[in-house]
Amino acid sequence: MWKPVSFLLLPLLLTGCVSYHWVHDHKGEAEMSQDRSDCASEARTRFPEKLVEYEVSHAYYAPEVSRCTTTRSSTLTTTPAAPGKPGTSTSTDHKEERVCQTTPGRWVPAVKAMRDVNSGRRSSHADSCFLQKGWRWEEVQQ
């Protein structure tokens, strides 16, 4: 029973020990940091930040909304007791009252935000530059 289960779990356990790192045949950590900085700078020069406004949600008309509640009022009448006899209480329903609260319809404006349309190009260019300098993304067993 355990052999088939362990056979299926073994690949999952081994993949948990894998990580990825940037490696270069002739450069170390300090050069990697410098190359990364140079590539990011070049990418910012070639693809500067370009903010563009876009709509997150459209404008719309929110219709009038009414919320109503009904209350029932009643009265309690108590008759005092005569000497030696019990008193009586009577409940009488008088009326139902309906109360409504209305929120008027209103125009809800569009929600807008800004985004950098060059962000993806800048990131791709920086990665390409880094690869051209001889760096590669490699799987490292731990």
Image (spheres, rainbow, N blue to C red):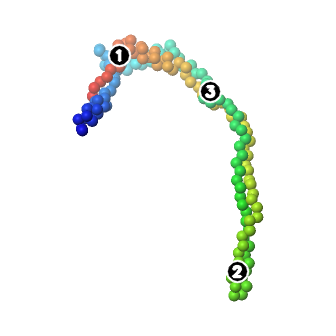
| Disc 1, SS | loop
Write down the quadrant of residue 63 in the picture: top right
The kind of residue on which mark 3 rests is Glu
Of the residues under marks 1 and 3, which one precedes in the sequence? 3
- Between 33 and 47, which is closer to the camera in this rendering? 47
What distance separates the C-alpha of mark 2 from that of mark 3?
A: 73 Å
Determine if residue 51 is in view.
yes
Instruction: Residue lying at the far front in this picture: please name it.
Output: 1
- Between 57 and 128, which is closer to the camera in this rendering? 57
Using the image, tell me which numbered label, if any, was put on residue 135.
1
Of the residues under marks 1 and 2, which one precedes in the sequence? 2
What distance separates the C-alpha of mark 1 from that of mark 3?
A: 39 Å
Q: Quadrant of the N terminus?
A: top left
Q: Residue at x 37, y 20 (%)?
A: 33
| Disc 3, SS | strand
Determine if residue 30 is in view.
no
Q: Is residue 76 left or right of residue 32?
A: right
| Disc 2, SS | loop
Using the image, tell me which numbered label, if any, was put on residue 87.
2
Camera-side mark, 1 or 3: 3
- Residue 121 at x, y = what percent? 49, 17
Q: Residue at x 34, y 24 (%)?
A: 20
Q: Is residue 32 left or right of residue 81?
A: left
Q: Are marks 1 and 3 in contact (CB under 8 Å)?
A: no
Using the image, tell me which numbered label, if any, was put on residue 55.
3
**Residue 83, above or below 18:** below
The kind of residue on which mark 1 rests is Trp
